[in-house]
Image: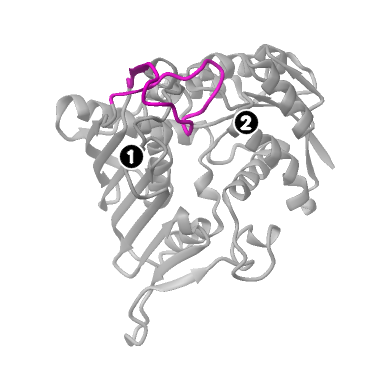
Amino acid sequence: MTELGIGVIGMGWMGQVHARSYSLARQRFPESGLSARLVICSDNVAGRAEAARDLLGFERATTRWRDVIKDPAVEIVNIATPNHLHVEIAEAAAAAGKHIFCEKPVGRTPQETAQIESIARQAGVLSFVGFNYRWAPLVIQAKQLISQGALGELTQYRGRFFSMYGSDPLGLLSWRFDREIAGYGVLGDIMAHVTDMALFLAGGIKRLVSNSHTFIAERPLPIPGKGTHYSRGAPEDPKGPVTNDDYVGALLEFENGARGSVEVSRSIFGPKNQMAFELNGKKGAISWDFERMNELQLYLPDADGGHDGFTRLVGGDQYPYHGNFNPGEGSGLGYEDMKVIEAFNFLQSVADGVQRAPGLAEALAVAEVHAAMIRSWESGAWEDVKCLRLD
């Protein structure tokens, strides 16, 4: 058994998800010989840190994130803090020789993403990034079909993430709506997933034209240390300005000649959590929607035309990783199962000493696309996707 010491910084909802995922990796993948030891967790709210230690089984808890990095038993530093802390924590972890898991978007801006990628690469530490939608078994199946050429030459790609978490004007002004802390709004928060999926499935993006908008200009102020971006205030509460984007859309030209679009919104009314894509080739098509994550729509007509229409594939243990959670067909997986698969793959990467995807290199590729979107907001024109790598 290979046991790896884990330190998690930031014990909000996402930090707790990561902690559970590391613990479950051994149970779901017992044949791997990998185990995670929850050494220490950190949160700037003492009660939240202690509650996480008690609930999740960490050996220690602290309010000082540097204690996590200094702990000699910690081999992996898991960053699940607000975005403005990513650079400082990643720099300290890399300097200490600790491997880094960072939740997207990896910093507040594309430039901060490039800085973090450079820091980790030059330090020679391994990395992973929370692009968890890649790990849905039917998304992996879609990727395999595309790589095998089953769809033929790709022609069109459409990706979106529509979420209602910011649709209520009385939703609290959490850190996600504050540019000083979060950086960009939905560009970093949910477009990061959409862009990564487009790059993962359809390949590199050559150029694009983009626009952004903020639909809800102010929100009720939260009580410090309480509430999330799902929490609701009252009409009479004092309010503050929203300083980043609610909506981003873009038209894309891929390096392989395919054309497409991506679109995200946190203030849309209707879809609850619709992270989805449709992809068309000259021989077939695929579509997937996280709201129905255990289904894949596949169009591969046979030669004689007897089968001409979409087929609904249902998740089952014939698809990657599904059997580690549920035997047979039709027994669905959920969000945290994807995070367990993600944690397992990072543990395996560290145990093998091999950098696997998605790491900070993939986060940088997303950041390069987002930098072009930002330039397009300013120019109102098509912009080329340019390299941001710092050498």
Residue beneath label 2, please? 15
The location of residue 319, given as percent across then percent down, is 59, 64
Rendered residue at 26%/53% (across/down)? 258
Tag 2's secondary structure? helix
Residue 110 to residue 304: above or below: above
Rendered residue at 52%/16% (across/down)? 85
Tag 1's secondary structure? strand
Residue extending furthest toward the right: 1
The location of residue 194, given as percent across then percent down, is 39, 43
The location of residue 165, given as percent across then percent down, is 42, 38
Q: Earlier in the sequence, mark 2 or mark 1?
A: 2
Query: Can you tell which quarter of the image residue 371 is in?
Result: top left
Q: Is residue 218 magenta?
A: yes
Placement of the C terminus among the 4 image quadrants = top left
Q: Main secondary structure of the magenta part?
A: loop
Query: Can you tell which quarter of the image residue 264 is in?
Result: top left
Q: Is residue 9 magenta?
A: no
Residue 122 to residue 156: above or below: above
- What segment is highlighted magenta in the picture? 217-243
Depth check: 172 or 80 in front? Answer: 172
Depth check: 340 or 362 in front? Answer: 340
Residue extending furthest toward the left: 380
Rendered residue at 68%/62% (across/down)? 326
Whether residue 352 is visible to the viewer of this picture, yes or no, is no
Rendered residue at 41%/24% (across/down)? 389
Depth check: 25 or 117 in front? Answer: 25
Placement of the N terminus among the 4 image quadrants = top right
Residue beneath label 1, please? 265
Q: Amino acid at mark 1?
A: Ser
- Report the disc number at residue 311: none
